[in-house]
Amino acid sequence: MACSEEEIRATAGVGYRAPRIRKLAELFASGAVDEACLSPPHCTAAAALDTVMKWPGVGPYAGRALCQLLGHFDFVPVDTETLRHLREYHGMSSLTLKTAPAAAERVYAPYQPSGTMFLAFWGELWEDYQRKLGRVSEMDPSEYDGFTAKRMTAAAKAGAGAGMGGEKLSMGGVAQGAVTMVGGTREESDGCAATVIIRPTSPSNAAGSMTACSCAQKAPSLLSIA
């Protein structure tokens, strides 16, 4: 390959992961890996996870994250950001990285039969992000790095993420009204309506596409997956 480990490390800032990334790239470049064969309907989620977990540098988190990129939404990747979300959003304050995977399985279990556990988690996560930091559509691209675990932790400490209501942090000078999302139901305080990513209202409609809603006036109280 033309790109050395040193170049990968310097360009992407991946540190010790550079050798593993290069080895993985070599697998794809050589034709040893065909991602199309790992995607639905050619491959089950379980088989895809088993395969990617054998790739260099891929552990439980990376394996599940790779699966959703391949089109399998049956798993919730658990890292420190997932841990933070479960602690704050679901009130599981005593969770650790060791116990978080089992907790995530329990929380999103209703979506397991439809193979949409990741979609339910991801929609919920972005709903919470925008509730705290404001709608992405009104942000300058330079502010996108605010969507990090560090920023979310700071928001929680500031009291913005303590409950489902309350005042959100303002980014880019945009003041936002408080938004509550519970099972697909949206309630707003007075003020500017927020854009939120809607998670499934129930496991039965979890296979639909996620929807963003933005409006100047109060929206209908029930928003769901299209």
Image: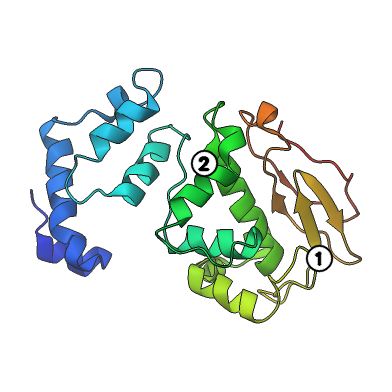
Residue, far top = 42
* Foreground of the two, 8 or 93: 93
The residue located at (47%, 56%) in the rendering is 100
Which residue sits at x=58%, y=78%? 154
Per the model, the C-alpha gap separating discs 1 and 2 is: 26 Å
Mark 2 is surrounded, within 10 Å at the Cα level, by few (under 14), some (14 to 19) or many (20 or more) other residues, namely: many
Residue 134 seen anywhere in this rendered image of the structure = no
Amino acid carrying label 2: it is: Phe
Which residue type carries mark 1? Ala
Residue on which disc 2 sits: 118
Q: Judge from the rendering whether residue 86 lies leftward or rightward of residue 19; answer left or right.
A: right
Along the viewing direction, whichever of 43 and 100 lies nearer the viewer? 100
Left or right of residue 16: residue 77: right
- Residue under the point 9% across and 59% down: 4
- The residue positioned farthest toward the bottom in the image shown: 158
Quadrant for residue 206, please give it: top right
Residue 91 percent coordinates (x, y): 65, 62
Location of residue 127 (image quadrant)? bottom right
In the rendered image, which residue does mark 1 sit on? 178
How packed mark 1 is, by other alpha carbons closer than 10 Å (few <14, some 14-19, many 20 or more), is many
Colouring convention used in this rendered image of the protein: rainbow
Query: 224 left or right of 25?
Result: right
Q: Secondary structure at mark 2?
A: helix
Position of the C terminus by quadrant: top right
Q: Is residue 185 visible?
A: yes
